[in-house]
Image (cartoon, rainbow, N blue to C red):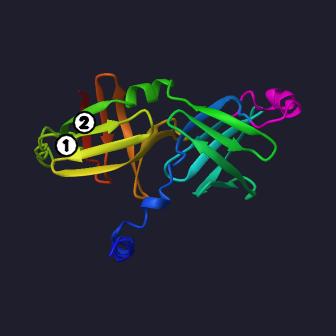
């Protein structure tokens, strides 16, 4: 009977449970060489990796810096492998993700085992990572007169946005709750956009204001704006 019960559970348990992968999303900077490097490798690597940084965005793009040289492209995380495609040259390569924790990751960069630490100290990230209460769901007026194009909808009670320092987010709109991973990116025109990835579906919310006292974003092509205040 117990054997039959175990077999039955295999059919009803969610298939993703045993294959859960912690995404590597976030901004990481060289911390140290991990255990497992030889003494000779450690001496060679210090100068080479001192300014190493890697930024993995939730929309599948990445930026990295090695020895002062920047690189960008797209990446995929398949199990313990990080697969890179460089935009400028279309070159592909891969690294092994040895371990991942909230604040650190260890990557096997072919010759070196490198430990990187999460960066959350830049000004914009420091402002964004907070618990925000949604106070307004207005839109842009199409002209300059005093008449609003439409009345802003009433904000459902309990609505808000949590942007956690570990790169996860929770957006609540009334009874609807959405979870996933977040980051922001600076565009070529120096504007900034909030990137939200939930179950592989990515959306971009341009940042209008982001101060310690207010966060406002444009949430659709119609110009609707959500305004948040810190809780």
Task: Give the numbered dot on residue 227.
Answer: 2
Q: Secondary structure at mark 1?
A: strand
Which one is in front, 174 or 206?
174
Q: Quadrant of the C terminus?
A: top left
Height in image: 88 above or below 5?
A: above
Query: Does 38 lie within the magenta span?
Result: yes
Viewer-side label of 1, 2: 2
Magenta range: 36-52
Q: Residues within 10 Å of mark 1 (few under 14, many from 20)?
A: some
Task: Give the numbered dot on residue 138.
Answer: 1
Q: Are the residues at dot 1 and dot 2 in contact (C-beta closer than 8 Å)? A: yes
Q: Position of residue 84 (x, y in %)?
A: 67, 54
Height in image: 72 above or below 162?
A: below
Q: Quadrant of residue 89?
A: bottom right
View extreme (right): residue: 40
Which one is in front, 213 or 15?
15
Q: Quadrant of residue 15?
A: bottom left
């Amino acid at each position: 009977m117990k054997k039959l019960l175990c077999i039955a559970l295999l059919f009803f348990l969610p298939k993703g449970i045993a294959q859960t992968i912690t995404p590597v999303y976030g901004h990481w900077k060289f911390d140290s060489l991990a255990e497992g490097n030889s003494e000779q490798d450690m001496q060679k690597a210090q100068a080479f990796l001192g300014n190493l940084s890697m930024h993995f965005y939730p929309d599948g793009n990445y930026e990295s810096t090695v020895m002062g040289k920047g690189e960008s492209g797209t990446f995929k995380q398949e199990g313990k492998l990080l697969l890179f495609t460089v935009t400028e040259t279309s070159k592909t390569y891969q690294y092994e993700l040895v371990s991942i924790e909230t604040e650190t990751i260890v990557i096997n960069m072919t010759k070196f085992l490198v430990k990187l630490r999460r960066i959350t100290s830049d000004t914009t990230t420091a402002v964004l990572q907070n618990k925000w209460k949604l106070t307004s769901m207005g839109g842009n007026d199409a002209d300059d007169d005093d008449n609003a194009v439409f009345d802003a909808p009433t904000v459902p009670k309990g609505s808000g946005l949590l942007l956690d320092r570990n790169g996860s987010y929770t957006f609540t709109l009334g009874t609807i709750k959405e979870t996933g991973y977040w980051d922001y990116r600076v565009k070529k025109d120096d504007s900034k956009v909030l990137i939200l990835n939930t179950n592989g579906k990515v959306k971009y919310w341009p940042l209008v204001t982001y101060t310690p006292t207010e966060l406002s974003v444009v949430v659709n092509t119609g110009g609707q704006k959500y305004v948040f205040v810190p809780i």
